[in-house]
Image (tube, rainbow, N blue to C red):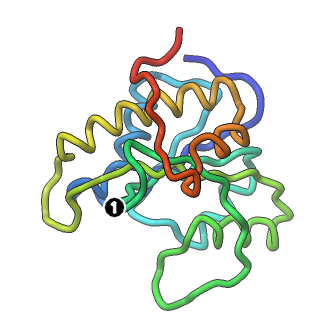
Amino acid sequence: MNYVGPHILVYGYGNPGRGDDGLGPALVEALEQLGATGLDCESDYQLAIEDAASLAKYDVVVFVDADAKGPAPFWFDRVQPNRELSFSSHSASPGQVVGLAREMFGAQVKAYTLGIRGYHFGELNESLSEQARSNLALALAFAQRAVREQQFDEYTRQFGIDSGRGCACDPQPEA
């Protein structure tokens, strides 16, 4: 799977040891197994303000995270930069990281969130629920298509969190 165009990062975050919370890293792992070239993939347990420096070198960043309440199987929306940082914990939101990348590094990165619907969170369990695995397959097909077609803003209109609907797309990626 080869991608040409802007420099893109897919950044999955969540805790794979907490059931469906591991959906973000699972999507990144699946992309890596497909051998995506021209696309960088990273994952971690959570976002941190330090991530602003690394994402500043990209044209597009897609943050991938599990969502306990959003539409199934997933939603896709634009990240709005946020200049307000909270120092109550080590984690940061996508908006905070993008806002810091803009403020500190002059980054003009376009950022999006792919929220994958999960169902079982918190318990010590290193596997995804059956429903979450099904949603992951659909989100993976969508991520492949989104990166290939690079119609990110159009997809936010179709599958944004405020649209009230998830994507009912075909789980098989297009050839």
Q: Residue at x 68, y 24 (%)?
A: 149
Residue 41 x, y percent position in the rendering: 52, 41
Q: Relative to the observer, which residue lies in front, 172 or 54?
A: 172
Q: Residues within 10 Å of mark 1 (few under 14, many from 20)?
A: some
- At label 1, the amino acid type is Ala
Q: Is residue 68 left or right of residue 76?
A: left
| Number of numbered markers | 1
Going by the picture, which residue comes out furthest to the left? 124
Q: Which of the two residues, 120 or 19, is positioned nearer the viewer here?
A: 120
Tell me if residue 102 comes above or below residue 19 in the rendering: below
Quadrant housing residue 18:
bottom left
Give the residue furthest to the front: 164
Depth check: 76 or 51 in front? 76
Residue lying at 73% horizontally and 42% vertically, measured from the top left = 153
Based on the displayed image, in which of its 4 quarters is residue 131 positioned? top left
Instruction: Give the residue at x 58% y 57%.
Output: 162
Q: Quadrant of the N terminus?
A: top right
Residue carrying label 1: 68
> Is 109 placed left or right of 61 in the picture?
right
Q: Residue furthest bottom?
A: 88
Above or below, comparing residue 163 to residue 7 in the picture: below
In percent of width and height, residue 60 lies at 71, 45
Residue drawn where x is 34% and y is 48% of the image: 23
In the rendered image, the vertical position of residue 113 relative to residue 29, given as above or below: below
Would you identify the image quadrant in which residue 145 lies? top right
* Circle 1 SS class: loop
The residue nearer to you, when weighing 105 against 132, is 132
Q: In x, y percent, where is residue 69?
A: 37, 62
Q: Position of residue 155 (x, y in %)?
A: 64, 38
